[in-house]
Image (spheres, rainbow, N blue to C red):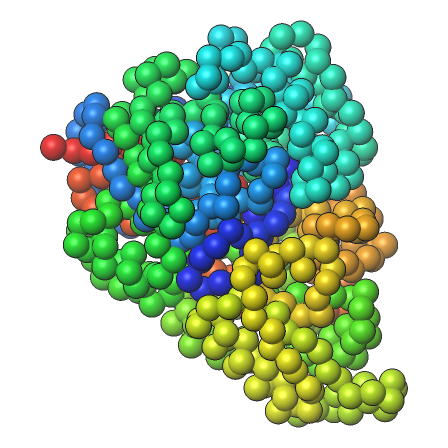
Amino acid sequence: MKNTSRPHAQNGSATLAFVLFLVLLAGACASKGGDNQAAPSDTTPAANAVGAVRSGPADGAVKQGGKVTYGIDGEPEGLDPTRYAFSQAGHAVASAVFDSLATIDEDGNAVPYLASAFEPNADFTSWTVVLPSGVMFHDNTPLDADALMTVWDAYRASAITGPPLKAVVASYSKQDPTRVEVKLNQPMRSFPIMFATQIGYVPAPAMLSDTTLAKKPVGSGPFIFEAQQDSKFWTFKKNPNYRQKNLPYLDAIEFQPIPDNDERNRKLQSGDLDVLQTLGGPQILELRTRPDLKKVENQRGDKAHLLMNTTKAPFDNLTARQAVAYATDAARYRKETFADVAAPANSPYGPGQPGYLADNGFPTYDLAKAKELVQKFTTETGKPLEFTFLAVNDAMNASVAQTFASGFEAAGMKVTVTQMPQINLLANVATGNYELSQFRLYGQPNPDADVTFYWSKTIVPGISVNFPRFASPEIDQAIVDALGSADPAKRAQDYEKVSKTMASAVPVVWLGQLTWMVAANPRVNGIYGAMNGSIPTVGPKMWIQSLSVSS
């Protein structure tokens, strides 16, 4: 049950975010996903309902064989989904070796993928996951209800996925060799979306007892692990017994962790890479000028923001949080960091989503107002407004953090920027050992999938996926109402309540909605399958199995 979140590392390096499962999307799922999508027939740009845009030449004739080298934006720490929170890079690699129970279609809905069906009861308090018969893991053990129960027990015991899972799922039980019933704590019409996030992966049970297999993963997916070297490569060979007939087309795929956005672009141009993924604004602008490349970009990506720990001083004080919001020049940030490829943001919801409001009352940059609030805080508390700002220890993040810190200091705050490896920053944020930090989150097409990040039920001792640890009865009720409602207008109103409550309480400072791109050389076919809205959602991307190369 977990989607990945991360501190806002522009170079995309390191492990990524903690996070969670992310429950639900819209609508019961009964159709089988996973069929190959039709390739574009010309070079005319086209968009879908969830903000994905593709452009470039049409795919050529599909053939069997060949190899693709894929440049990813960071190094996966490990590929045991019960132990590690996957980054965007981690999901790219994981989707080669694991199938997920569900994937996301071009309308943002969860549809069965590895699962044959998801069957709800009448009031959506119980769902049955139906598995196909005869599927085997790469170690020749069966992927059946017993294996799924074992994997879910590990997810439930995990410090990362356990708290949000327990907030949603009351129990689960084997019905027969291919059916597992899941009973929920409250009605959820979109429950299958959880299976299009990290908890949807079904690793072989052997991985759960052998920690060395985190870097030698065993799944049931289209490719079988072959070799791995930290910071160099992850290589996989074709699974000859894959459950989908004639797939994968490729004999092999190699993922190369390349944190530097410019270097990935150069390697694609030189032919050292066949495919890359990026969120770098200047790099996306450069790739857009290349009509020869095949490209898919999602312009409704995750939201960059600043997290504030609302349970610790000084940010247990609303005046302090408001002061930071008014002192943050988000427009400057989007221009200088993302070349204005990123769009404005003011809530977890973007254009086209239920809950989106162009003006929800969120504070916009006003240095004079920020100064007034800093003085008000000092008058109210008798203390200066001072805090520590966590940043990843690379040049880009350090520069961004110092720019923000300068703005805060101009308003009269005292700021200490503390840099650390991304994995350490994530651990501090997840355990509440921080005051202010950069972050990136909220990329799912449907807001149901992100509610565990602001639901008070996920505020627990130790690791909490409600990173600001902000509790609101109004938000909690709106979540329950939205998840159980079949009325789109009512759901929109529920999430608008969340938007307005968060805007007034300011547990986070919104910076921008990001754009992600996947680009490929013309000889590569199949990246247009990424138009399922999953590029920036850090959920499983079930399209890598359909990659091929032309002669």
Q: Is residue 60 above or below residue 355?
A: above
Quadrant location of residue 501?
bottom right
Q: How many marks?
A: 0
Q: Which residue is drawn at 74% across and 60% down?
A: 432
Observer able to see residue 5: yes
Residue 270 shown left or right of residue 162 in the figure: left
Percent of width and height locating residue 248: 32, 24
Residue 45 shown left or right of residue 416 in the figure: left
Quadrant (top left/top right/bottom left/bottom right) for the N terminus: top right
Question: Looking at the image, which is closer to me, 400 or 546?
Answer: 400
Percent of width and height locating residue 278: 37, 55
Question: Looking at the image, which is closer to me, 545 or 151?
Answer: 151
Question: Looking at the image, which is closer to me, 368 or 94?
Answer: 94
Q: Which residue is drawn at 78% across and 91% down?
A: 375
Residue 231 shown left or right of residue 383 in the figure: left
Q: Residue at x 38, y 62 (%)?
A: 280
Question: Looking at the image, which is closer to me, 409 or 543?
Answer: 409
